[in-house]
Image (cartoon, helix red, strand yellow):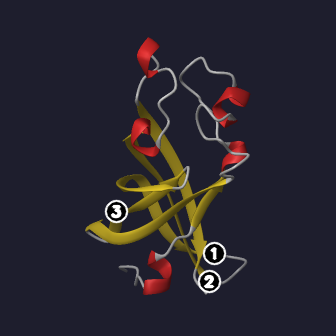
């Protein structure tokens, strides 16, 4: 059964509090990730993604395109589904959909340019987990 997406579902809003974001594949201290060199989470505590399009592979979402806001700057991104599923929740008795999504961004497009001149990569992989309960 193909999920029905409404305008409300497309405005995903805030993805995450950035205080919990961390570098997992590069040797950077987690506190440095939060500093003004990268996410500047003291000034910009949240990331925001607003979807503006969905691509399906059969009945499942394969790509969600939209606008990602970090550090007060907004750029288009496409989140590719690496896993996605909907099911009837046995306790809530409502449909629940969730998935894992990923994309690679150039951090400098959002103003994160620290370390580029001495080899810290510009491209970073974002891993996003989403779960939603149908209202």
Tell me which numbered mark, 1 or 2, is placed earlier along the sequence.
1
The alpha-carbon separation of the residues under discs 3 and 1 comes to 27 Å
Is 115 located above or below residue 113 in the figure? above
Residue 65's tag is 3
Tell me which numbered mark, 3 or 2, is placed earlier along the sequence.
3
The alpha-carbon separation of the residues under discs 1 and 2 comes to 6 Å
Residue 94's tag is 2
Cβ atoms under marks 1 and 2 closer than 8 Å: yes
Residue 89's tag is 1
**Where residue 109 sits: x, y (%)?**
39, 43
**Where residue 135 sits: x, y (%)?**
61, 87
Tell me which numbered mark, 3 or 1, is placed earlier along the sequence.
3
Name which residue lies at 45% across and 12% down.
Answer: 118
**Where residue 92 sits: x, y (%)?**
70, 80
**Around disc 2, counting alpha carbons within 10 Å, would you say few (fewer than 14), some (14 to 19), or many (20 or more)?**
few
Name which residue lies at 64% across and 32% down.
Answer: 33
Secondary structure beneath label 3: strand
> Which residue occupies the foreground of this view, 64 or 68?
68
């Amino acid at each position: 059964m193909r999920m029905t997406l409404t305008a409300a579902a497309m405005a995903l809003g805030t993805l995450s509090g950035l205080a919990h974001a961390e570098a997992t594949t590069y040797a950077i201290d987690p506190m440095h990730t939060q500093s003004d060199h990268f996410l500047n989470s003291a000034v910009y505590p949240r990331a925001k993604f607003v979807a503006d399009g969905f691509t399906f592979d059969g009945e499942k979402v394969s790509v969600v395109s939209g606008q990602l806001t970090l550090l007060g700057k907004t750029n288009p991104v496409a989140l590719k589904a690496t896993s996605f599923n909907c099911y009837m929740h046995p306790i809530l008795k409502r449909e629940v959909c969730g998935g894992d999504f990923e994309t690679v961004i150039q951090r400098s497009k959002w103003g994160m340019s620290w370390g580029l001149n001495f080899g810290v990569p510009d491209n970073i992989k974002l891993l996003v987990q989403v779960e939603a309960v149908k209202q």
